Amino acid sequence: KNEVEQSPQNLTAQEGEFITINCSYSVGISALHWLQQHPGGGIVSLFMLSSGKKKHGRLIATINIQEKHSSLHITASHPRDSAVYICVVSGGAQKLVFGQGTRLTINP
Amino acid sequence: DTAVSQTPKYLVTQMGNDKSIKCEQNLGHDTMYWYKQDSKKFLKIMFSYNNKELIINETVPNRFSPKSPDKAHLNLHINSLELGDSAVYFCASSRNLAGANNEQFFGPGTRLTVL
């Protein structure tokens, strides 16, 4: 079992739908990151959080430290949100553990 | 201005050759990283340098040798390239060590194809 598990692995939805991507981890962490990798390959950091909730535009990230779980939500999804979303946890001794990614496709 | 840049963007080479990928960041960050993304799109950290010193060295073949001439540069040299080295290699930087809750900025990636 991976130390960081994302679900679902693939998600296809219609434009306008509310999207949720989940990340569960089994290691102690100091922070959790959500990355977005565009179809062209570029990687962008969306959020870095260690507690609570953060919001950027239509994107919301939450984390529950006790349950070792984080969610990434996209409201009013749009085809340009189509990308791979990657959960990364940073733990002690500068350890970084990556989830396997969730491929999101938003159809018009 | 590009924050984290990598060169080349594409690299096609024969098995057995030695090649280098360069990375530069102009963000004033102390920490830089190399990642490998395989054909299954899984990202794995390879190395991390903080202020030119090696911090993380995951299990990679010793054919891979990172070199940091200064804290704005982290180059990756690969000896005796093998078919399995074909992947996309990403460089990234953060203000300091990732465990200190710092956002990472990624370069555009270098697609390496070994024939």
Image (cartoon, grey):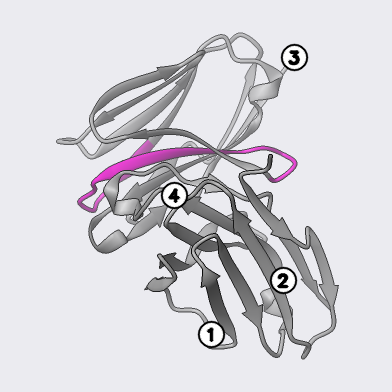
User: At label 3, which amino acid type do we have?
Assistant: Pro
Disc 2 to disc 3, C-alpha distance: 34 Å
Report the residue at 50% width, 53% height from top: B93
Quarter where residue B7 is shown: bottom right
Per the image, the residue denoted by label 1 is B61
- Label located before the other in sequence (4 or 1): 1
Q: What x and y, as percent, mark residue B2?
A: 67, 43
For the residues tagged 2 and 4, is the chain the same? Answer: yes
Per the image, the residue denoted by label 3 is A108
Q: Residue B86 — which label?
A: 2
Report the residue at 72% width, 71% height from top: B86
Per the image, the residue denoted by label 4 is B94
Q: Secondary structure at mark 1?
A: loop
Stretch of the chain drawn in magenta: A23-41
- On whether residue B63 falls in the magenta region, the answer is no
Q: Is residue A101 above or below residue A79?
A: below
Q: What's the chain of the residue with tag 4?
A: B
User: At label 1, which amino acid type do we have?
Assistant: Pro
Residue A24 visible, this orientation: yes
User: At label 4, which amino acid type do we have?
Assistant: Ser
Residue A1 visible, this orientation: no
Q: Pointer 2 and pointer 3: residues touching (CB < 8 Å)?
A: no
